[in-house]
Structures are given as structure tokens and as C-alpha cells.
Amino acid sequence: MLRARCLRDIGDGGNICRQRAGIRVGVGLFIGSSPIRRYAEGWDLALMLRRTREAMDFAVKHDVPVMFVTEDTTRADPETLRQLYLTAIEHGAERICLCDTAGHATPEGTARLVHFMRELVGPGIGIDWHGHNDLGLALVNAIAAFEAGADRLHATALGIGERTGNTSMELLLTNLQLMGYIQRDLAWLLPYCRMVAQACNLPVPANHPVVGQDAFRTASGVHAAAIYKAQQKGDDWVADRVYSAVPAALLGRHQKIEIGPMSGVSNVRYQLAEYGLEASDEMIQRILGVAKQSDRVMTEVEVLRLLVGAKPRRRE
């Protein structure tokens, strides 16, 4: 009875969405596939195939495009996957989705799975990859899936998701861009992630790559010196990369040099230049003297208080 109602909702919901949006709206029909899930549920393969046929036939009858999904794909055996996916395609599935539901996969295993499925379904069926981050491998698994032939990757802002989360969208897009696979305007990622963090009441960690507040900040004297020297040469391209694997400009950001106990003269010169200020060597040493006695990075107010009569001028 429950299955019948769910199938009926697919047809009714698809029609309503099409009418309101004016576009063809598809669904993702899924079923668990791994031996551990089948054992927990008491399923056999014959039951799973029958449910797949019923669901597919109903969706196709109501002109609802289907992406057929197997949960826990990465822990399923090849023969079960072969029968489930081929049955779904025979009954009208237009796309398939491979899921690392428990975050079990490694990059090598991901690539082997995608290669296997591409050979199985042929070039005419789209392949999605849906990964979780339980082992901290969601990002590299998504890239491995793409390189192996998946043509759509699932991700979420900040990797928000079940348990330890999903593939982080901002990291995936940044890496794909730097690897030359895509060419997008990524400047919107920072405000987008901040908006999602606020909506989900989930603060962005300061050290989060790409969008964290510390992603492009340094107080190290060696780092600051290299960045400052590149800027003095008029080479902003080098300045943005000499100590950063990710150029800040790609995200609409810029390198930020601060003053702390590990800083040097270049840190002070850089920060004062940011304010449109110049200072004598004596003043620079005074600021560094205070910084060396501190156990943290100095705030802007603390720096400016040491500059008698200094008025900050922000960079546009």
C-alpha cells in the first residue's frame, strides 16, 4: 500500500511540477543494493528487480524522466549492480547514479566502478556520482569519478550532509577549475557558502579551504616577504600564487598579510600600504617589537594606535 501511494505521488507530483515550472521534471528512484543492506532488510534480488520494474514502468507511464539510483553502490557486488541497472534502463531510465552512501570508497575503487558502469550502460546513459565524506575522501573520489567518465557530480555547499557530510561544492568546483576541466566564474562561491552557513546555523571554520576567513591570510615573515616583493615588481599574478595553491582572485578575494609574532618588516610594510600609509623604519620596528611580544596576530586597531595621527584609507 505504501509503495503504491509513493508511486502515485511520483506521477501526480511530476505533472504538477511540469505545469508550474513549464519544464520536464525528473525524479531519482532508488533502492539499496549492498549485501549488508539486503541482509538488514530481508530482501532478495528477485524482489529488488520486481520493485525496480514496477517503479520504472509507473514513472515512464506518467512521462516522468527517471534517474535510477542504487544506494550503497560502492559496497555492492558487480552482478547485483549489473542486473539492477540494466533492468532499470530496459524499462526507461535515462540516467543512473552511483552512490558511496557510507563514504566507503577510495579513489581507485571509485574509478574502477565508474569504468565498469560506463562499459555496462554505454555512452547514451548519463552517469551521476554521489559521494559522502566519512573517510575524508569525498572530494578526491568525486574527481576520480569525473576522470573515469561520470558526467555529473553531486556536491553541497560546505559539504553539509548526512553524518560527516557530502562532497564540498566549493572545493570541487575550485579543483576542477584549477585542473582545467571547467571554466566558471567562482566569485559567487564565498557569498553563497556564507548564506548557506547562516541559513543552516553552521559557522564556516576559519581554516576551511577556499572560503574560510584564514584561507588567504598569513602572518609569517617569509611568506609576507615573497608576496610583498612580487607586488613591488608589479606582478600581482605571482603575488597571488607564490604562497598559495589557490589564487585568491579566482574566488574574488585577495591575499591578506597580517602582523604577528612570526612576522617581519614586509608584513608591516604590506599592511601599512593597504591603509595607504607609510612609516619610518623606527615606526616599523616599534610595531614589530609589540608584535613579537604578543601570542597572536595584532588587530588593525592595535596597529593603527601605534601610528600617531594615522588615518586608514581602505583599498577599494
Image (cartoon, helix red, strand yellow):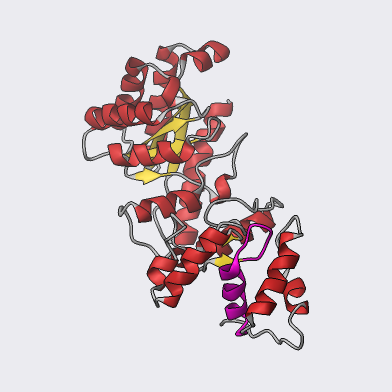
Task: Identify the residue shown where x is 53% and y is 40%.
Answer: 166
In the rendering, at what x and y percent does residue 38 appear?
Answer: 50, 14
Task: Identify the residue shown where x is 64% and y is 82%.
Answer: 280
Q: Quadrant of the N terminus?
A: top right
**Residues in magenta, as a range:** 258-277
Q: In the figure, 291 relative to 111: above or below?
A: below
Q: Quadrant of the C terminus?
A: bottom right
> Of 204 and 161, which appears nearest the observer?
204
Question: Within the magenta stretch, is there residue 153?
Answer: no
User: Quick check: can you spot residue 178?
Assistant: yes
User: Quick check: can you spot residue 216?
Assistant: no
Q: In the figure, 294 relative to 134: above or below?
A: below
Residue that sits furthest to the front in the current view: 282
> Of 193 and 298, which appears nearest the observer?
298
> Of 150 and 272, which appears nearest the observer?
272
Q: Is residue 115 left or right of residue 104?
A: left
Residue 148 picture quarter = top left
In the rendering, at what x and y percent does residue 129 appear?
Answer: 40, 38
Residue 6 picture quarter = top right
